[in-house]
Amino acid sequence: MHKFPRPVPLVALIAILGSPLPAGADWLDDLFGKSVDKPASASELTTSQIGAGLKEALEVGTVRVVDTLGREDGFNADPLIRIPLPDSLKTVQSTLAKVGMAGTLDNLELELNRAAELATPKAKALFIDAIRTLTLDDVMAIYNGPDDAATQYLRGQMSDPLAEAMEPIVDQSLDQVGAAATYESAMGQYNALPFVPKVEADLTTYVVGKGLDGIFLYLAKEEAAIRNDPVERTTELLQQVFGAR
């Protein structure tokens, strides 16, 4: 036969509930005889834990951004990050339009955005590797900084290495979507015209720069969401680090 604990006498229960809460004590612990889990405070977290949380926030944000931008119309349909023709090629386009050959560049702008969309998923590993190389030297400044502090730190420290690593990826993507061939054809027609100024455009460098701008823009938004919105903290570490903050 199961032995159930003797019920608390009603008078005693009323006395417990009706008395003031014990000063400086956890009354739930006293009443039920067990600890109640509480979130850690920022002061209880180590620099290593905070650093791991920041890195995880950036990694989670990167995956979300890559999944969004690295698909058809991820760049092309977004007015905030859509890649326009380089200014130098706008001169070529207007010149060709005067002689009835503007159609050569009609599709190039779309192809530049398609190249960025194609390259973005391939750049995920580069971003994750860059994030994991963040040092702990500036962790607390980043942790207590503005909502995009980690993103801006990453951008300041890693933009050049990331751009260099992304160049062959974007170069291949430009070939794959036909942008390189479109550019060569347009420039051939333009250079055949008399008395036109010399124009050059490095499409690879241009798309890499614009692509990184778009990725960092949305990575900053993801970082801010994780910092401020509990719903966006999808792992235990994120909940611990940013919940304490």
Image: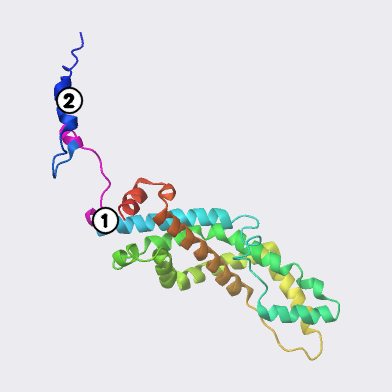
Is 187 positioned to the left or the right of 31 in the image? right
Q: Amino acid at mark 2?
A: Leu
Secondary structure type for disc 1:
helix
The quadrant of the picture occupied by the N terminus is top left
On screen, residue 205 above or below 245: below
> Which is nearer the N-term, disc 2 or disc 1?
2
Percent x, y for residue 77? 66, 60
Does residue 222 show up magenta in the picture?
A: no
Secondary structure type for disc 2:
helix
State the residue position of label 1: 42
Is 43 positioned to the left or the right of 22 in the image? right
Segment tinted magenta in the rendering: 28-45
State the residue position of label 2: 13
Q: Amino acid at mark 1?
A: Ala
Residue that appears at 33% across and 56% down? 52
The quadrant of the picture occupied by the C terminus is bottom left
How has the structure been colored for display? rainbow
Percent x, y for residue 205? 58, 74
